[in-house]
Each structure stands twice: as C-alpha cells, then as structure tokens.
Amino acid sequence: MRLDGEIAVVTGAAGGIGAAVCERFAAAGARVAALDLQVPSNGDMALACDLADDGAVTNAADAIRARLGAPTIVVHAAATTEFAGTLQSSPAAFLRVYDVNVGGALRLVQAFAPDMQRAGKGCSPSFPRSTRGWARPGSLPMPLPRAGSRLS
C-alpha cells in the first residue's frame, strides 16, 4: 500500500513499534513526524514530546502543521510503565503511566482529529504494548490503563 501524500505522526518513534512504523510509512511514501521523549533519529521531522504535557503536545502539533501540513495518520505507539509490583508501586507512578498511555491518546486525538475531520479522511490507531517479559505476579500490567482509551 502506498502512502504518497499522507502525513503521519508517530509517537514512540525512538524505538520498537514506533520506529518500525516510521520506517514502513516512509518507505511507503508518507511524510513522517516522529515523536518521543528524546528526539528520535528518524522521520522527516523529529521532535521531543512528553505526551503527558498538554503544552508539549500542542506545540508539537503546531510545529508539525507548520512544517509538514495537517496529518492524515496518527499512530500512538508510545507507552510507559513502572517496573514494580502493585504493592510497591506509588500512586504518582501509576498516574504517570495513565497520563502518558491514556491521556496521551486523548491529547493526540484533540490535537489532530479536527484536521482529519476537515479533510474528510484520516485514522489514528493506538497500539497497546505487549507485557510479555514485563508482567509479573502481583504487578499491574502496563496496558491496563491504556485500555481506558478504547472505552467510549
């Protein structure tokens, strides 16, 4: 499938699923805005962006629109977790996980969906990360807060 003329925003672009999505989209002809906590080394435009920060997401969205145009694809592949058991985890750490994984999805939709609606096209998949190798007895799996972003 060719993506010529499409503008894609990909979070978690510095590694794993996000980096692979950036590579595939670029190979298919899309212009890619790569976002991560640290500036990624891929994409037509690479930005540091904390998805738990309203201002950071708004600033990234404005910069992307100014340089590449209005995105037609947004892929939320970024996620975080705390490597601690439920009884050892702090409420602050849990809230950080929730704010990045679920709040980040909300911020991305609010930042980019209006552009897609105006254009009459677009998509925004969200990839819950696998807990393989992360989940331990007594721990709160990282994708659990992410599931909240799928509820309507």
Image: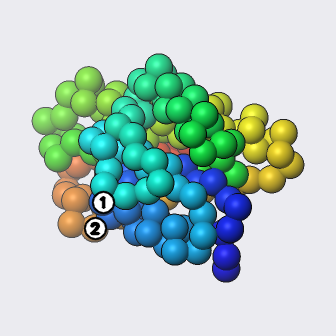
- Amino acid at dot 1: Gly
Image coordinates of residue 72 in percent, x first then y, are 69, 51
Q: Quadrant of the N terminus?
A: bottom right
Q: Quadrant of the C terminus?
A: top right
**Helix, strand or loop at mark 2:** loop
**Helix, strand or loop at mark 1:** loop
Disc 2 marks which residue? Answer: 132
Residue at 54% across, 25% down:
58
Residue found at the far top of this picture? 55
Residue 49 showing in the rendered view: yes
Residue 132 shown left or right of residue 84 in the figure: right
Residue at 68% across, 59% down:
6
Residue at 75% across, 35% down:
114
Residue found at the far front of this picture? 67
In the depicted view, which residue is nearer to us: 114 or 44? 44
Camera-near label (2 vs 1) is 1
**Vertical side of 82 occupied by 28: above or below:** below
User: Which quarter of the figure has residue 70?
Assistant: top right
Image coordinates of residue 96 in percent, x first then y, are 32, 30
Residue 104 shown left or right of residue 13 in the figure: right
- Amino acid at dot 2: Arg
Residue found at the far bottom of this picture? 1
Q: CA distance from mark 2 to mark 1?
A: 17 Å
**Vertical side of 67 occupied by 23: above or below:** below
Q: Residues within 10 Å of mark 2 (few under 14, many from 20)?
A: few
Disc 1 marks which residue? Answer: 15
Residue 62 shown left or right of residue 138 in the figure: right
Residue 61 showing in the rendered view: no
Image coordinates of residue 7 in percent, x first then y, are 63, 54
Q: Are marks 2 and 1 in contact (CB under 8 Å)?
A: no
